[in-house]
Amino acid sequence: MASLAKCRPQVEKKCSCLPASVALTFEGEKTTFGGPDLVANILSRGISNLSNGLPAGAGRLYACVLSGLLLGLSVPCFSFAPLGFLAWAWLVPLLFELRDVEKFRPFLGRVLIAVGTGFTIITLWVVNASVPGLLASVLMGTFVWSLPLVVFYLVRRLVDWPTALFSLPFVWTGWEWLYHLTPFSFGAVRLGYTQADLLWLIQYADLTGVEGVTFWLVLVNVAIFLILDARKGEEEKGRGGEREKGRRGEGEK
């Protein structure tokens, strides 16, 4: 991976009243920005290469924590704004991190970071009653919401990645339903509850129950991931084609 240290800015002043044009080099690929779009172009390129400049493992940590934040903030316990819509995409950063992970331990580590972060936010209010109670709530919630992702890992070992993704809504919803039939049921552990403040979106809940809302949420997360992943693949393919054209042009010279 490239690091931001390898990004060598070269400034060429065009005139005293206009921004300088800046040439940025990433792993031998040189791109020049200039004119009125200088700042916007630099920010756009910088964001797309940010993960390459992070220390080893930091990008994975940030993505997992981001998933946890989206999950935790989506729970309807913040009176200043209904943030349930964040649950529509909370799995997306985590799925990007899990896609290429083959071994179980790193897979589980990413899942625990994401779900643990989310459930710490969800149950933080318990600290007012008991710190041990908070720890127990976080551990219980993290275990319950990590288990369907562990099953997802096992399914993925048997089938291809797209098929495993489409199984995830069924796995997650089925596990929530089974878990709440047990005497150890923990009421807060229902993904569908994140939509409690968005009643106009869940009018179907009187027919499907909260399990139907959970199924829909996970399905939307999978759909968003597939759309973004396809776009990312097209962009990488386009950049690869541009590099190949550049090499051919240099060879002809």
Image (cartoon, rainbow, N blue to C red):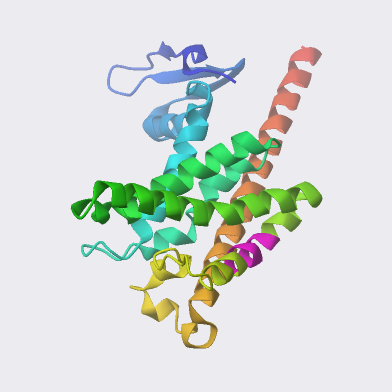
What residue is shown at x 60% (from left), y 16% (from top)? 27
Q: Is residue 106 above or below residue 209?
A: above
Residue at the image point whose x is 77% and y is 47% from the top: 157
Q: Quadrant of the N terminus?
A: top right
Q: Name the quadrant containing residue 41.
A: top left
**Image quadrant of residue 108?**
top right
Q: Position of residue 43 (x, y in %)?
A: 41, 32
Identified at 37% across, 19% down, the residue is 20
Q: Position of residue 240 (x, y in %)?
A: 71, 30
Which residue appears farthest toward the front when viewing the image?
A: 183
Question: In the rendered view, does 48 fall on the left or right side of 17?
Answer: right
- Name the main secondary structure of what is drawn in magenta: helix
Q: Is residue 248 above or below residue 78?
A: above
Comparing 227 with 250, the one in front is: 227
Q: Residue at x 60, y 34 (%)?
A: 106
Residue 139 % position (x, y): 42, 49
Residue 170 belongs to magenta span: yes
Task: Look at the image and tell me whether residue 121 can be seen.
Answer: yes
Q: Is residue 218 magenta?
A: no
Number of numbered callouts drawn? 0
Q: Is residue 158 left or right of residue 240?
A: right
38, above or below 107, in the image: above
Image quarter hosting the C terminus: top right
Q: Position of residue 141 (x, y in %)?
A: 44, 55
Q: For the magenta stretch, what is the residue range?
A: 167-173
Res 67 visible: no
Q: Of 53 and 87, which appears nearest the observer?
A: 87
